[in-house]
Amino acid sequence: AVPLGPGYRRRKMREISGRVGKSRRPECWAWARAQCHLQLPLLSLMLGLLSREPVDEVLQIPPSLLTCGGCQQNIGDRYFLKAIDQYWHEDCLSCDLCGCRLGEVGRRLYYKLGRKLCRRDYLRLFGQDGLCASCDKRIRAYEMTMRVKDKVYHLECFKCAACQKHFCVGDRYLLINSDIVCEQDIYEWTKINGMI
């Protein structure tokens, strides 16, 4: 037996695809893939979850005819991602805020108003449920927010629960349940609410 070497599959696929030509008929490509026994994995996004699936079961066209949703170049890589109804190079599918590669940081991708976010940035911006801890209304992707521990607030809701004063940079406050109380009203607020 002749050792095939590490580049054998790639060379064999090129040779076979040259014979198949520019045909876009699925049966030609299925035959070509079967000839070199090449299994190309595909990461696909199904209901927000990334999962591995064999290309043969998902694609009816060769991977080299796919266009990346990020850089708009053809995808010739062995591995690629499918998310937001588009195909991506692994390097091109990244969080719009921190730039981390979304295929590496977990199995979830958050997509809100055209922004691709990793879980950490999504939770940082919108909290666990996407609701303001003060008014219980939805936080939209374009709204400015304030965050205290695991609570997220609309910017306009981030004010003292007792005197309704908005906070400035450097102001001290106390978080009591979901209520934010300024330094001047802490004693009064705790007394009114039976905490003293």
Image: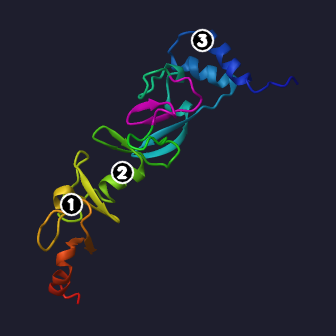
The reply, left or right, for residue 180 in relation to residue 86 is left
Residue corresponding to mark 2:
122
Q: Nearer the viewer, mark 3 or mark 2?
A: 2
Mark 3, Cα crowd under 10 Å, few <14 / some 14-19 / many 20+, is some
* Range of magenta residues: 75-93
Relative to residue 59, is residue 141 depicted above or below? below
Q: Nearer the viewer, mark 1 or mark 2?
A: 1
Q: Secondary structure at mark 2?
A: helix
Residue corresponding to mark 1:
168
Q: Is residue 31 magenta?
A: no
Q: Check the image and name the residue furthest to the front.
A: 170
Q: In the rendered image, which quarter contains the C terminus?
A: bottom left
Residue corresponding to mark 3:
20
* Chain-order first, disc 1 or disc 3: 3
Q: Residue at x 25, y 54 (%)?
A: 145
Q: Position of residue 163 (x, y in %)?
A: 11, 72
Mark 1, Cα crowd under 10 Å, few <14 / some 14-19 / many 20+, is few
